[in-house]
Amino acid sequence: MLDVKKLRERLETLYDVYANIAGEDQVSLVIRPPAAEQEVARVERKIGLPLPHALRDFLLHFSGDCEFEARLPEDFELPGELGAIFAAELVLSPEAVYYAENVRREWIKGCFPDENDAYDRVWHHKLGFMQAGNGDVIALDIGADAENPPVVYLSHDEGEGHGCILGRTFEEYMENLILVGACGCEDWQLLPFCPDAASGIDPNCENAVKYRERIGLHW
């Protein structure tokens, strides 16, 4: 069950941490009121699919438009595998879901139509809910589990993260993403926190500990 109070507190903590590093002009946090049932139902009609319970729960009970973004200073150095991280981002709303899912369908239509091809197949039987800035999609694998699907990464350009599990459930993905600092949406920012392709984001891995120490994030 979604802990609304804890989620808000953690996002507000992230705002303070990144603002301390980059300045308030480089960080934004918007948590609008929960979506109305009609808004979610309208998106479901438009995409022709029901939203899994955990995603619906987030939109209906936490926020109908949650936007967190932070950009690290260009001279902010991070060690080893963490060096590619340049920002933090979490944007989720009914319209964001609709947009991400349509991007996924356009990639299938234009580039990845063949379910018999191993790379193409990963794009199928998913539900996009967030788009990365590079055109990739973060999706729910409704083909694996329609009720409580895992979160997977879909790369359009043979990225290392293609097909990697980012969370065994939506709730696990959201919690662990925030615990590691909400580090971007591109696979090169997320994979340092995933020990392997099936583990999902691990907030206790060595890289997660290093990153929190570097940015001064203490949970």
Image (cartoon, rainbow, N blue to C red):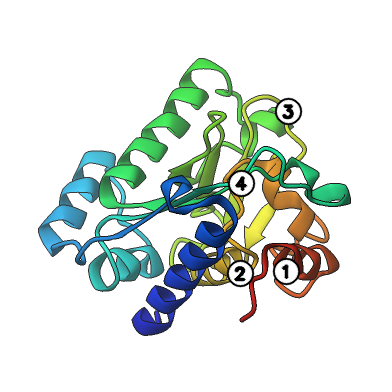
Report x, y in % for residue 123.
57, 36
Report x, y in % for residue 85.
69, 45
Count residues near mark 3 (Cα–Cα under 10 Å), then give few for <14, some for 14-19, many for 20+: few
For label 3, the SS is loop
- Comparing labels 4 and 2, the label whose residue is closer to the camera: 4
Where 129 sits versus 6, above or below? above
Q: Are marks 1 and 3 in contact (CB under 8 Å)?
A: no
Report x, y in % for residue 16.
49, 67
Q: Are marks 3 and 4 in contact (CB under 8 Å)?
A: no
Q: CA distance from mark 4 to mark 2?
A: 20 Å
Quadrant placement of the C terminus: bottom right
Q: CA distance from mark 1 to mark 3?
A: 23 Å
For label 2, the SS is helix
Count residues near mark 1 (Cα–Cα under 10 Å), then give few for <14, some for 14-19, many for 20+: many
Q: Where does label 3 land, which residue?
A: 158
- Comparing labels 1 and 3, the label whose residue is closer to the camera: 1
Mark 3 or 4, nearer chain start: 4
Label 2 sits on what residue type?
Asn
Residue in the image at 34% along x and 36% along y: 99
Label 3 sits on what residue type?
Glu
Mark 1 or 3, nearer chain start: 3
Report x, y in % for residue 17.
55, 65
For label 4, the SS is loop
Mark 1 or 2, nearer chain start: 2
Is residue 163 visible in this depiction of the protein? no
Label 1 sits on what residue type?
Asp
Label 4 sits on what residue type?
Leu
Question: In the shown orientation, is residue 171 left or right of residue 93?
Answer: right
Is residue 110 visible in this depiction of the protein? yes
Q: CA distance from mark 3 to mark 2?
A: 25 Å
